[in-house]
């Protein structure tokens, strides 16, 4: 895994534990940076990036009818409990989704193959995952030499 400050992107090894790959601050073309490996591994602060799931009217708290509690102390405890449960479920799905698990393993294999094969390394498969860690229905191989990709359909649960 890459270390804090290392260059990273979609086609590089993944960042180490507690880190994530983000475009450099002020980068005018952040998507380009991620696809070209010009982003950087930085510390991952979940509270910064993910919206508070209990803060607005579309929130789980509101939908469960907990927006007008009888006892303010009980409300705070209930809010924290629900928020913790939702965040734990989201984190578990993202970290342990079958597609994300395979994606991280594939990135390691790709990094090793690229180092071993150098210029001979021309095509590879990276799983196409949704935000919950499951497979998107369409999966494709990637070619570094411009060949048309080979694609196929899969089950979102098991690939």
Image: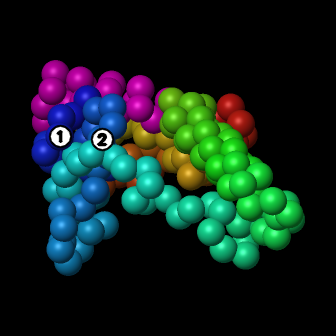
Q: Is residue 141 above or below residue 96?
A: below
In the rendered image, which quarter contains the C terminus?
top right
Q: Which residues are magenta?
A: 102-121
Does residue 51 belong to the magenta stretch? no
User: Residue at 16% across / 56% down in the picture?
Assistant: 38
Residue 70 position in % (x across, y down):
86, 63
Q: Are marks 2 and 1 in contact (CB under 8 Å)?
A: yes
The circle on residue 73 is none
Residue 2 position in % (x across, y down):
21, 34
Q: Is residue 57 above or below residue 18?
A: below
The circle on residue 19 is 2
Disc 1 packing (10 Å; few <14; some 14–19; many ≥20): some
Name the one closer to the observer, 91 or 33. Answer: 91
Disc 2 packing (10 Å; few <14; some 14–19; many ≥20): some
Local secondary structure at mark 2:
strand
Does residue 112 belong to the magenta stretch? yes
- Residue bearing the label numbered 1: 4
User: Magenta stretch mostly in which secondary structure?
Assistant: helix
User: Residue at 18% across / 74% down in the picture?
Assistant: 26
Name the one closer to the observer, 65 or 107. Answer: 65
Residue 96 position in % (x across, y down):
57, 31
Q: Is residue 114 above or below residue 80?
A: above
Name the one closer to the observer, 57 or 18. Answer: 57
Q: Does residue 18 appear in this view?
A: yes
């Amino acid at each position: 895994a890459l270390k804090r400050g290392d260059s990273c992107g979609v086609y590089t090894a993944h960042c180490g534990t507690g880190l994530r790959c983000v475009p450099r601050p002020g980068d005018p073309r952040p998507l380009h940076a991620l696809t070209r490996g010009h982003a950087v591994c930085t510390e991952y602060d979940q509270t910064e990036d993910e919206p508070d799931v209990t803060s607005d009217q579309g929130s789980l708290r509101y939908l469960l009818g907990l927006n007008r509690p009888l006892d303010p102390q009980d409300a705070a405890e209930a809010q924290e409990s629900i928020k913790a449960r939702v965040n734990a479920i989201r984190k578990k799905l993202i970290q342990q989704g079958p597609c994300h698990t395979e994606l991280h393993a594939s990135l390691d294999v790709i990094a090793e193959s690229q180092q071993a094969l150098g210029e001979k390394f021309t095509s590879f498969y990276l799983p196409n995952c949704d935000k919950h860690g499951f497979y998107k229905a369409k999966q494709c191989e990637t070619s570094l030499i411009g060949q048309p990709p080979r694609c196929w359909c899969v089950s979102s649960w098991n690939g």
